[in-house]
Amino acid sequence: MSNIQFHCPHCRQTIEAGLDMLGQLMDCPACGQTVEVQKSPVKLPSLPPPPPRLPPKLKMPMPPAPPKMASKKKEYKVLTQRDPAFGGEFSPEKLEAVLNSFAAQGWLVVSVATISLPAGPGCARDELIVIMGRNQ
């Protein structure tokens, strides 16, 4: 018994069936649609080849989310030139040493400002203010 080949009108898959199936209905093995076994092969226009399949994207594991920290309270410290940390002698070198010692304890400089303070009648002097903060 010889076979006949024809194309599924739905998916264009080539189907082979026995001659005894001519005119009968069958399910396309590729798409599952019901098709009639054709008496003569149907010439379908050739389709362009399908685009090459891309390899599946690999999913990279996500790093674990950092644990949510309870909101920490902030603590602030204000230094002036008259602060006891300077030992009565304020200089840029002393300021650097004091800031480094506080940094070792977790303090960070938040802001620096100068203010003018009265120093006597008709006189004013500028004073340095350093504001530091850290999480408790």
Image (cartoon, grey):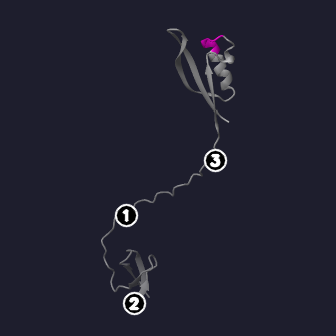
Q: Residue at x 61, y 27 (%)?
A: 132
The relative height of residue 130 versus residue 25 in the rendered view (above or below) is: above
User: Badge 3 is on which residue?
Assistant: 68
Q: Residue at x 58, y 22 (%)?
A: 130
**Which amino acid, mark 2?**
Gln
Could you give the CA–CA distance between mark 2 and mark 1, rounded to whole angstroms? 30 Å
> Which residues fall within the magenta stretch?
89-94
User: On residue 24, which mark appears?
Assistant: 2
The stretch drawn in magenta includes residue 54: no
Q: Position of residue 10 (x, y in %)?
A: 37, 77
User: Badge 1 is on which residue?
Assistant: 49
The relative height of residue 91 versus residue 8 in the rendered view (above or below) is: above
Q: Quick check: 72 left or right of 35?
A: right
User: On residue 63, which mark appears?
Assistant: none
64 and 61: which one is in front?
64
Dot 1: within a 10 Å radius of its alpha carbon, few (fewer than 14), some, or many (20 or more) residues? Answer: few
21 and 89: which one is in front?
89
Check contact, mark 3 vs mark 2: CB within 8 A: no
Q: Position of residue 30 (x, y in %)?
A: 45, 76
